[in-house]
Image (tube, helix red, strand yellow):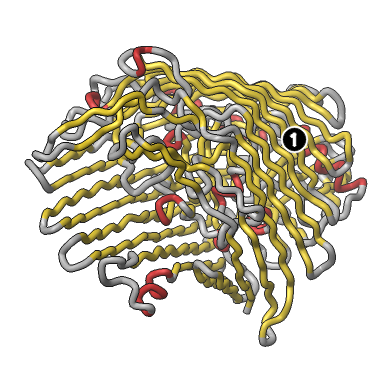
Amino acid sequence: MRSFIFAFLIVFVMNAQAQEMATLSGFVRDRANKETLPYANIYIPALKIGSATTIEGYFAIPSIPEGVHTVQVSLLGYQTSEFTIDTRRTKRLVQDVYLTDKAVQVTEVVIDAEKEEERRATQTGRIVMQAKDIVSLPTIGEADVFRALQLMPGVKATSEISSGFNVRGGSTDQNLILLDNTVVYNPSHLFGFFSTFNTDAVKDIDLMKGGFPAEYGGRLSSVLNVTNIDGDRVNTHGKASISLLSSRLTGEGPLGNGSWFLSGRRTYLDQVVSIARLDTGKDALPLYYFYDANLKINQDLSDDDKVSFVGYLGQDDLLWKLGENELSINMRWGNRTSALKWTHLFSQTLFSNITASYSRYLSTTDFNFGGVRFAQSNSIDDYSIRADVDFFAAQDHLVKLGVWWSQYRVTYSQTGDGEPYEFLERPAQISFYAQDEWRYDERWTFQFGLRTEYQDLSKHVTTGPRLNVRFNIDDLSSVKLASGMYYQFLMAVPAGSDNGFSPFDIWIPINERMNPSRAIDIVAGYENRYLEDVSLSLEAYYKTFREILYFRNEITYTKEVDQLFFVGDGEAFGTELFLQKKAGPWTGTLGYTLAWTYRTFDMLNGGEKFQPKFDRRHDLTMTVNFQADESWRFGAVFTYATGQAYTTGVARYEQNPFGAPIEFTLPGKLFNQRLSPYHRMDLSVTKRTTFFGLHGSWYFQIYNVYNRRNVWFKQFDNSKNPAEITDVTLLPILPTFGIDFSF
């Protein structure tokens, strides 16, 4: 804490000295709605210096020499803007830049600006997407953030009907998932079929697969930061979407000195079942629906002070009754998040954010089988305060400092046969980080970081160094190197064998008899842009895991967290290739991953090393989009992957837990066989048109166009001797249709 305060004071002293030099700063905004634009590139060609906007759209270029200089501002999907500054007249240059949203033409100015942006970026394994990138992909029913990310190399889908994802050998709970910097603990709907992120509300998606900077912690594998739309500061308008599965409604507009944004969606399978009276009798169908809503309000208190409120509300509801008192199931699960953020500019070069946030995940289940009742409930409440400071110290130094404090309340209760079971923990955790991005010269850029964390239940203090290095070989190619140490104090008890997010997953903190899980990774990458509108990246990684946990399925009633898990180690390594074409009528991506993942637990699998379910040797994805004209767009996605690992049965045995014999399968060595390879192709067509005077579009999609019945898992029927093994397959060919329109 003392070191953090000392570093903070140094920043203020350096900031005061820096004001003697000329500085250009401001926000980059969309010209049409004045919404801020993150990750835009600001570049002064004559001086070969520049900067990129933060996630809030702010930039600063300090220490500009005297003279008249041309400044270029670019962002993919927008026309490049140019303006002139004169540092002889004033040292304090403040200017907001407005970009026009239009398909970017491949001109020399644009290409030079994008080259410079890539030359300066140090982060390895980073994927940045916008909502329009997701909407252009064929999918099931509607576009989804997680399904778009699952098409990227190094990101593996647990299954095609799960929004869970594994990154470079990590489990699903090792991904830090943020919605406007607020942690979301179970971002799924329909048992993982959809994620909680409504694409109508999403502005940007930022995924870091490894070597992520010191400002992020608490997870071992990746960081996903989803930013919601701020809202139109100029005009009030909205849009609506109707598909076979759900309807969505969105509105936005100016409010005071800022804007508002509101978006909601709901599925209506329950209404269809109810109207058709299919929810009663012995063959009754379940009444199921989910809804979610996003709200964001922004206000400018002054030129230097801005506040914003972000809220999210989402819930799934399932009610299923079979016969008269035979079986009833009532399940509800959902997330609530809210955050209040204050952005303050101490000066042109000192930018700060203070955020107070609340996140809650709650799941309740109530079974009634012939009068025998079983119920369970689990929840996690997260109260957090976060403060971050960005200091643009000089042209070659960007310093970041921050602190993150969280108070948790984790509960689980179970009633039914036997004594009631309850679990309650209230851990607190605090983290400090410091980071400096140093541009040594035109070729070398270094990013040094350090993160310290403390959790009061385990009494552990951890320190994780971070390093990112970039070397520009020439104007069109570069190499990157990254490494870091990461720690995790919270983990999820999975429902089943890590099938992705489930309402039964329970987040649990480690106690005083446990050590935090930790990981160390090394990432090396190469990238180039020798072809004008095509980028290529090749990355290799090696990662070790220590003190990772594997849930003991046979243990149910215990309040000692350390008795719920096996403790072991792991490693993961692989190579990823990614090609992307961003401009022109034909665009698309090609991603390929060759990877290995291993786990070792002394008390599991006879102590032998095994490859978990999410180990996949080969993973290939291709996406193609063709914009025929202003009205017609066609898309295709192809996926191929090595089959998932599974555990075979070696024998049958019989037990009599309830007075009647029940046959069980004796498993062999863990994950010793693989399913057949997985592959699938999806197609889509979108047509812009007008509905009753409203501008919009209709789309038609075919999921699994050649009807490949991929295997989900193997099912063992122990009522037969020998046991019969059958394949449980995933979705067949599935056409969907939908309409979007604006008003």
**Side of 431 relative to 169 (left or right):** left
Q: Position of residue 690 (x, y in %)?
A: 71, 81
Q: Can residue 312 be seen here?
A: yes
Tag 1 residue: 63
Q: Position of residue 640 (x, y in %)?
A: 65, 39
**Side of 461 relative to 706 (left or right):** left
Does 434 appear above or below 65? Answer: above
Q: Can residue 483 be seen here?
A: no
> At 33% across and 50% down in the image, what residue appears?
361
Residue type (three-letter) at the residue carrying disc 1: Ser
Tell which of 480 and 608 is nearer to you. 608
Q: Position of residue 264 (x, y in %)?
A: 48, 68
> At 57% across and 63% down in the image, what residue appears?
200
- Total marks drawn? 1
**Side of 617 relative to 323 (left or right):** right
Tell which of 13 and 498 is nearer to you. 498
Quadrant location of the C terminus in the rendered image: bottom right
- Quadrant of the rendered image containing residue 113: top right
- Quadrant of the rendered image containing residue 124: top right
- Quadrant of the rendered image containing residue 118: top right
Secondary element type, mark 1: strand
Tell which of 599 and 387 is nearer to you. 599
Q: Position of residue 512 (x, y in %)?
A: 24, 22
Does 357 appear above or below 165? Answer: below
Q: Residue furthest right?
A: 108
Q: Residue furthest front?
A: 721
Q: Residues within 10 Å of mark 1 (few under 14, many from 20)?
A: some
Q: Residue furthest bottom?
A: 692
> At 80% across and 25% down in the image, what residue appears?
472
> At 45% across and 68% down in the image, what residue appears?
266
Quadrant location of the N terminus in the rendered image: top left
Does 369 appear above or below 346? Answer: below
